[in-house]
Image (cartoon, grey):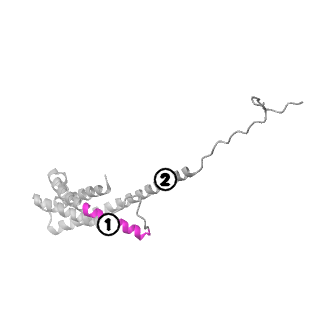
Amino acid sequence: MTPVTTRVVTVGGWSAAAALVAHGGPALLVDPRWLAVALAGSLAAASGLAVTGGRALERHAQLARLARGELAPATASGFARAPMSLLLGAMLACQGAAHLALLAGGVHTAAEPGGALALHGALAGLGALVLYRLEVLLERVSDRLTAAVSRAIQLLTEAAARPQPTAVPAPASAGPSGHVRLRGPPPVR
């Protein structure tokens, strides 16, 4: 799975579950009909956000590299985490889409509207925070892997550039051809 696909599934799934909890509590999570309705709404919104947000994340990563002083484009595309504000906005948008899908399907909120909206916001914030922390961890692992691969390539390049030892030819013997010189002390004459 690509990072964008993983984000779409994570944000959409979390948002659908959070919207179900906000509407009817955990009991709605086990009903596949309402789960399908909530997933349809939230994944549709997440897919739309992924199409437009992918370019925004790419630009954000380029700006971060420029801010660090890296002028050359990146050669290895490691994982770049999404900003917390973007994740929170995506969670809220996807929960809003799941909320509308549930309302259209006939599932109204169990609590008063203000309480349900506050619960939507709190669950979106919690989901964004969890996803952000996971992306921080994934970014660290990706950076370490990129550094390890770069170091391995550097070591292999250096090893290939070193001259290989060649066999030293044996010195020509001073004796007549076919003469075998025995080892040991010279004969006494």
Quarter holding the C terminus is top right
Which residue bears the numbered disc 1?
Answer: 84
Residue in the picture at 30% in, 68% down: 85
Q: Position of residue 60 (x, y in %)?
A: 34, 67
Res 153 label: 2
Please say whether residue 58 is one of the residues in the magenta stretch: yes
Q: Position of residue 32 (x, y in %)?
A: 16, 50
Circle 1 packing at 10 Å, graded few (<14), some (14-19), many (20+), is: some
Image depth: mark 2 or mark 1 in front: 2
Q: Which residues are magenta?
A: 50-69
Residue in the picture at 21% in, 65% down: 93
Name which quarter of the figure residue 13 lies in. Answer: bottom left
SS class of the residue under badge 2?
Answer: helix
Three-letter amino acid code at disc 2? Ile
174, above or below 47, in the image: above
SS class of the residue under badge 1?
Answer: helix
Q: Nearer the viewer, residue 106 or 51?
A: 51
Q: Nearer the viewer, residue 121 or 74?
A: 74
Considering every residue shown, the one lying at the far front of the view is 177
Three-letter amino acid code at disc 1? Met
Please say whether residue 92 is one of the residues in the magenta stretch: no
Res 116 label: none
Q: Earlier in the sequence, mark 2 or mark 1?
A: 1
Magenta stretch secondary structure, dominant = helix
Report the side of 174 relative to 17 (left or right): right
Report the side of 83 relative to 21 (left or right): right
Residue in the picture at 26% in, 57% down: 8
Q: Position of residue 38 (x, y in %)?
A: 17, 57
> Is residue 139 at all visible to an observer of this figure?
yes
Circle 2 packing at 10 Å, graded few (<14), some (14-19), many (20+), is: few
